[in-house]
Structures are given as structure tokens and as C-alpha cells.
Image (cartoon, rainbow, N blue to C red):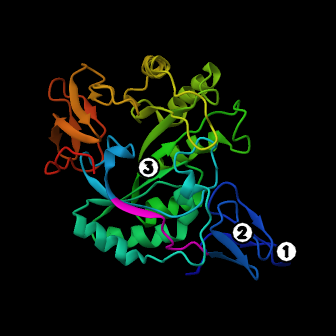
Amino acid sequence: MLRKARLFQRLDGGVVQCLVCERRCILPPGARGACGNYLNIDGTLFHVGYGKLSAYESRPIEIKPLFHYWPNSTALTFSNWGCNFYCPWCQNYHISFRKPRDEDPYTPPEELVEMAKVFGDEGLCASFNEPATQFDYLVDVFTLGRKHGLYGSVVTNGYFTEKALEILVVECGVDGWSIDIKGCPQMKVLRGVDHEKVFRNAKKILDLGGHVEMVFLVVTNANDFDECVEWIIDKHLQYLGPEVPLHVNRYYPANRWFEPPTPIDKLFSIAEKARREGIEYVYVGNVHIPGTEDTKCPRCGKTLISRYAYRVTYFNLDKVGDTYRCPRCGHRVPIRGTYVKHKSSFLL
């Protein structure tokens, strides 16, 4: 399937520039962008990976991770092929490092939405690989899903252009964003990435009315040094403020990065520093230690939400109008969407 891209500009000599992500690839005729999904055909940019999915399944929203967005719900989660970063520690490199092929089967947006309804999901989520690689497909899927009452969410490196964000959030209703912050300007890997643009985009999403949670995968000997940690915490508070959750997640060796898993004590140290600096909701993930992913009231310390195996096992918040509040002290806790009570506590 071919779809003419929504976001590109024509340059001289049949050259085009893709405007989906901040790589802004400049492509002569016959060339593909860095993600492998956008191709210049005779001076027009086409999404050649449109609807060529690598996976789809119903999954808990907490696994994204999104802890303050539609708690205990499930989303029909889908992915395609390719990426625009190619992190050497990528857990899903088997799909992220592979380009779409002509023989890959096509899944129309209508089929995804129908599957979500059959599975009883509350929403849709683009995940597993980088969603920016299938921007035009996302627009069609989430627009249709919105008409059927399904929320829209993504797990992303946050490197969209601002125009792409405006289309997804405002026009398509994609309001749930789990954003991976890969590191900082001082890193020796991913040198071509402007990490501050990720925070800029996260703020843009908030300003447009979306919900954001940041994820810091602490990679051994890549982004785990003190200067990088301090830069990330400072930018989080500068751009996003204290209420936006921060997930401090453990890395495990994968793909081409074989450094040891992140030490547990380093994760706890980073989390404690983030709390001390003023971030109110800090979680330690990928460690499966009870309590590290619980939500506590930042004012009085009461445990408000407990989680196990990516499901909510305890939920104790008072709903007052459209807001959730601590039942002990009345502090407002940022929760987007509705707590879904009927889901059982098991990993899908």
C-alpha cells in the first residue's frame, strides 16, 4: 500500500524533505528516509510502510508505562517496521532495525479498530517500535478509533516535528504519551540527536492538552553518569514541572550493547534525587520489586495506587468532578481518563 505523505516539502530538482520527525530527511528521487518508511517517488513523498504491521495485541496500559492514564485499562497495541534512532541497546531491534518490504501483509485501520472492540480494549496504542515511522497510518487509525470511543496513545522517543504533534493531539485525539528520554548532549552515543527537542515536544503536547509521562532507561556506560542524570532532571522540571511522572527504568543487555544490567542501587539513587529535586511522581521500573511502582500522595505520603504484573491491584482515590484526589488530605493527583475497575489483575 502506498499513501502520499501529509508532511513534506518539495525542494529543487525533484528533492523532497520529510517533515514527520526532527531528522527532517532530505531525499533525492528514489531515496528513503532514515526510518525506511518514507520514499521519494518522482518528487512526491510516499508512506511505503503504510499498514505493514509487525505485531498487534491487547496489552495493559501500565506496561507502556503509563501509570496516570486510564488506569487498569487495556489498549490494542500495534507496531510496524523501522526506527529513526537505532539505539544499540534496543530490546525490539528485530522489528526496529528492519525496513518494511513489498511482501509484508497489509492491515487496514478498520481491522485494528474492530479488533480493539472485540478484545474489549478501551483504547489504541502505537508501541514496540517508533510510531513516527508510521505517522500517516497513525492519523487514519486514531481518527477512526476516536469515532468509536477509543483513546489514542503512543510509546515514542518523542522526536516528531511540532506540526506532526499538532495533527496527532489536536486533530486525532492522541492524548496519552509515554516518551523515552534517551539521554543528554554529553552522551557518546546517539550523537545526532538533539535531546532537548524531546523535552520541547513533551511540553508542546502538554500545552496542546495531552498527557505525558517520561521514561528514563538508565543504560550502563551510556547515559548513567552524574552529569547526564542531572541534565535530565533539570530539563524535566524546567519544561514539564513537578507533576509529570518520571519512570526510572532498568536496562538489560540487548542487541549490540552488552554492558551489565543497571545496578538496583543506582536506580534508587536516581529516583531519590529526582524526588529531592521536586518531581512528585517517580517510579522505578523493570525491577519487579514491590512498592517501586506504587503511586503515593506527594503531600501526605499515603499509598493511593498499587500495581503488580502491570495491573492495578489497589486504587484509593476520591473522584471529584473530573479530578482525582487523595482521600486523606485532598491533594489533587493528575490522572487522565477513567480508572477501569472491571479488569482483572493479570499480565496479558
Q: Nearer the viewer, residue 279 or 272?
A: 272
Q: Position of residue 136 (x, y in %)?
A: 53, 70
Residue beneath the point at 73% across and 33% down = 188
Residue 164, label in figure: none
Q: Is residue 218 left or right of residue 286?
A: right
Q: Is residue 322 left or right of residue 54?
A: left
Residue that carries the numbered disc 2 in the rendered image: 32
Amino acid type of the residue that numbered disc 1 sits on in the rendered structure: Asp
Residue beneath the point at 42% across and 66% down = 172
Task: Report whether residue 147 is seen.
Answer: no
Q: Quadrant of residue 32?
A: bottom right
Q: Residues within 10 Å of mark 2 (few under 14, many from 20)?
A: many
Q: Is residue 49 magenta?
A: yes
Amino acid type of the residue that numbered disc 2 sits on in the rendered structure: Arg
N-term mark: 2 or 3: 2
Q: Position of residue 9 (x, y in %)?
A: 71, 71
Amino acid type of the residue that numbered disc 3 sits on in the rendered structure: Trp
Which range of residues does the magenta coloring cover? Answer: 48-57
Residue beneath the point at 47% across and 38% down = 215
The residues bearing labels 3 and 1 have C-alpha atoms spaced at a distance of 36 Å
Residue that carries the numbered disc 3 in the rendered image: 177
The residues bearing labels 2 and 1 have C-alpha atoms spaced at a distance of 17 Å
